Amino acid sequence: MTLDELLALLPDNDTGEISAADLRTIVTDLYHAAHLWGTQYAYQWSTDQTPSNGKVSKSNGWVEASGILHVAETSDEGMAFGVAFLDSGRCEAIILTAPGIAMQMTPTDVSVDQGGYRDIPVDVVKASLVAPSNNDLLSLTVVASV
């Protein structure tokens, strides 16, 4: 939430009626702003369950269901995919995005090294109804607590 959105949750305090839910939202968003860190990588969506360099896929496709996220150890721009936060238990979310497309996941266990890619068990929090096509460029963001 933006600062203006957070402040809009607090009515002019002449009446003293600020809801506990609004205060919880504000405190939670401020905590996350201060304590979360994200790293973003470029990947291409793949229908292959054993993704090559620069590719990412999910065992059961682009659906709002638990599954295995398959992430190549080298991103599309040649960066090494960091698994330290994933395997430390400090990963809050993995988010795949492109214009009009988004999927947010929570890792449920440590990643498994499959050679050139990692298998990451995930629960999908939400996913857009629009799915990427094979080889569509996506941003993969790892959000972790610091």
Image (cartoon, rainbow, N blue to C red):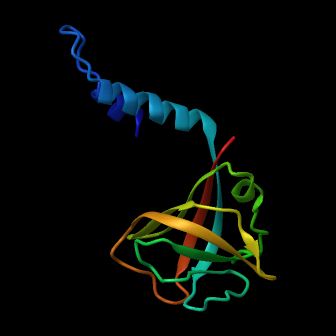
Q: Is residue 120 above or below residue 3?
A: below
Residue 9 seen in the current view: yes
* Residue at point 49%, 31% (across, down): 30
- Numbered label tally: 0
* Residue at point 23%, 15% (across, down): 12
Q: Nearer the viewer, residue 109 or 5?
A: 109
Question: Residue 49: x and y, percent?
Answer: 61, 89
User: Where is residue 63, by image quadrant?
Assistant: bottom left
Question: Residue 74: x and y, percent?
Answer: 76, 76
User: Where is residue 47, by image quadrant?
Assistant: bottom right
Left or right of 42, for residue 60: left
Q: Is residue 66 above or below residue 91?
A: below
Extreme residue in the top direction: 14
User: Where is residue 57, by image quadrant?
Assistant: bottom right
Left or right of 97, for residue 81: right
* Quarter of the image with the C terminus in it: top right
Extreme residue in the front direction: 109
Left or right of 86, for residue 48: left
Question: Residue 115: x and y, percent?
Answer: 81, 82
Residue 7 seen in the current view: no
Q: Is residue 19 above or below residue 58?
A: above
* Residue at point 40%, 37% (across, down): 2
* Quarter of the image with the N terminus in it: top left
Question: Residue 14: x and y, percent?
Answer: 20, 7
Q: Is residue 100 above or below residue 26?
A: below
* Residue at point 71%, 88% (across, down): 52
